[in-house]
Image (tube, helix red, strand yellow):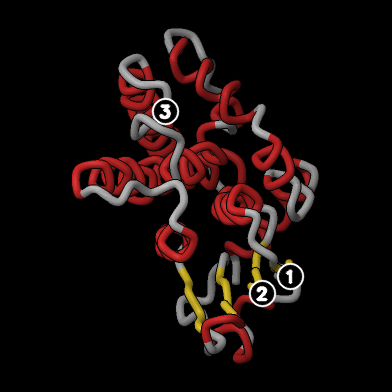
Amino acid sequence: MIDFFTAPTPNGHKISIALEEMQLPYELREINFDQEDQKKPDYVKFSPNGRIPTIIDRDEGDFAVFESGAILIYLAEKTGQFMPSDIKGRSLVMQWLMLQMAGVGPMMGQAFVFLNYFPEKIPSVIDRYKNESARLLGVLDKRLGEAEYLAGDYSIADMATYPWAARFDMLGLDGQGLPNLLRWLDLVGDRPAVETGMELPPMISADERIERAKKMLVK
């Protein structure tokens, strides 16, 4: 059994999708940002950065894993699913996973913050992150014109990238000129495990999400 600590965010949804895809038994434990659960000692002792998601694998001596990319790799290796065993195939998955971790997630995340949550609007900063997000979506589109999924076959790289890429419209971006990305979003989004994972825990309204984020920025 896996204890899964999460909240309704793209990084959390990566792991709920993976757990559903891999059909692993898990207990969902929602972290309440309003109550600052992520900063409490009982949580930080196994998630040192005080962020979500985190898992505790009870079948492996209560082994804790934090950071969403590390969790995806751990689960893929634990189950032998969605990660090739050959060195080139594994490297391809890792490359696209790292692009999400180092590029797509941080850039889109900052764009969300400065566009929707930050108390002052700074056009040059908003443009910087929106433009970089748009560029990265173009990188994904080009790749998806060459392959059905990011690493060829469906993998943890797709699970990591989908929850972020699926929200591109929240940045005021459109899908014009990104036909391959839109094809992939439909393809991945129609998977039953993805549909379920994207609702665990259920997303809060956009207005509520903005208000919560604004509170966190001033703490």
Query: Is 194 situated above or below 202?
Result: above
Depth check: 8 or 162 in front?
A: 162
Give the residue at x 31% y 17%.
146
Q: Which residue is mark 3?
A: 149
Secondary structure state at the residue bearing disc 3: loop
Q: In the rendered structure, which amino acid carries the disc numbered 3?
A: Tyr
- Name the side, left or right, on which 199 lies relative to 120: right
The residue closer to the viewer here, 199 or 72, is 72
Q: State whether residue 122 appears in this view.
A: no
Instruction: Give the label on residue 1, or none.
Output: 2
Which mark is nearer the camera, 3 or 2? 2
Instruction: Determine which quarter of the picture holds residue 41.
Output: bottom right
**Quadrant of residue 137 within the rendered picture:** top left
Q: Which residue is mark 1?
A: 27
Q: Secondary structure at mark 1?
A: strand
Q: Residues within 10 Å of mark 1 (few under 14, many from 20)?
A: few
* Mark 1 and mark 2: Cα distance apart in space: 7 Å
Vertical arrangement, residue 20 with respect to residue 173, above or below: below
Dot 3 or dot 1, earlier in sequence: 1
Disc 1 vs disc 2: Cβ atoms closer than 8 Å? yes
Identify the image quadrant of the N terminus.
bottom right
Q: Position of residue 136 (x, y in %)?
A: 35, 30
Q: Quadrant of residue 55?
A: bottom right
Residue 96 against residue 184 in the figure, above or below: below
Tell me, yes or no, whether the two marked residues, 3 and 1, touch with CB atoms within 8 Å: no
Q: Residue visible at 69% across and 65% down? A: 25
Q: Amino acid at mark 2?
A: Met
Residue 113's spot in the image, x, y percent?
A: 53, 47
**Residue depicted at x 57% and y 30%:** 188
Q: Is residue 3 visible?
A: yes
